[in-house]
Image (cartoon, rainbow, N blue to C red):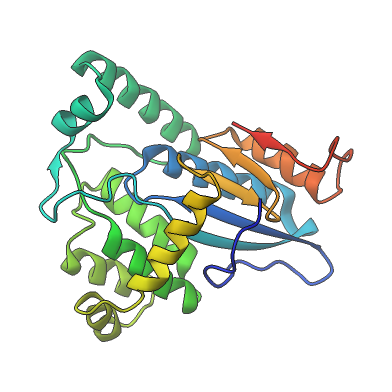
Amino acid sequence: MTASTGSQPVNTRPAEAVPVRIDFVSDVTCPWCAVGLKSLEQALDRIGDRIAVSLRFQPFELNPQMPPEGKDATEYLTQKYGSTPEELERNREALRLRGAELGFMFNKRERIYNTFDAHRLLHWAALEGHAQAFKNALLRAYFTDGDDVSSHATLVRLAVKVGLDAQRAQRILSTDIYAGDVRAQERHYLEQGIHSVPSVIINRRHLIQGGQPVETFERVLREIAGLDEPLQGDNLSVR
């Protein structure tokens, strides 16, 4: 699989370490994306300075037709997946437990929102070197605090919180700046066969999907970087 250039890299390790590119394709309102990112970050912490990571956040919209006001989460998920309220509650409890293991708090989501503007601002945050901090701020705002991540006021507040300029953030949101870039990246990954998230693409070749455990990310990254036994074959796909 080949990934395009996308956002600017963040979190680069020392030059003498093994270079590893990671494209993290995800949505702001995807709970397993929060799990996957936390697992990936903890795996990288375990490996430490032995790899030099270029981490790029790529856009994906689970609900691209979501209206600006959003929809009730239970009602929407029931209609979209055919889930019963009991099944939704079991899924929420599983997420709460996984999140707790990783130090991330999931509270009940009341509404699901459109995330296109959040992706536009995240694209800008990457250009300014604040992508990872802003991505984490968005996930906490939505899943822990229950904030409306389609709200421009919320997005500007979160941008300022991670060190971005408020006036520039507001200008981006009030225009269509970066809209073309985000849509181009979304199309690219759809054309590459990415239809579920999180999808974590390592060195444009190896694919890990879903909220995998920390140990899975660590094992795969160590193998790809040549720190452990080499992979069998040219490609690795973990789902």
Task: Say which quarter of the image contains residue 4.
Answer: bottom right
Relative height, residue 209 to residue 139 (above, below): above
- Rendered-image quadrant of the C terminus: top right
Residue 71 at x, y = what percent? 13, 42
Residue 180 at x, y = what percent? 37, 72
Relative height, residue 174 to residue 239 (above, below): below
Residue in view at x 33 percent, y 57 percent: 138
Relative height, residue 54 to residue 41 (above, below): below
Between 162 and 59, the one lying in front of the other is 59
Between 72 and 61, the one lying in front of the other is 61
Residue in view at x 40 percent, y 52 percent: 60
Determine whether, in the image, residue 138 is placed left or right of residue 185. left
Question: Which residue sits furthest left?
Answer: 69
Residue in view at x 38 percent, y 50 percent: 27
Relative height, residue 219 to residue 153 (above, below): above
Total numbered labels placed on residues in the image: 0
Determine whether, in the image, residue 51 is placed left or right of residue 204. right
Residue 141 at x, y = what percent? 28, 53
Question: Which residue sits furthest front?
Answer: 191
Between 60 and 10, the one lying in front of the other is 60
Residue in view at x 58 percent, y 47 percent: 200
Residue 132 at x, y = what percent? 48, 62
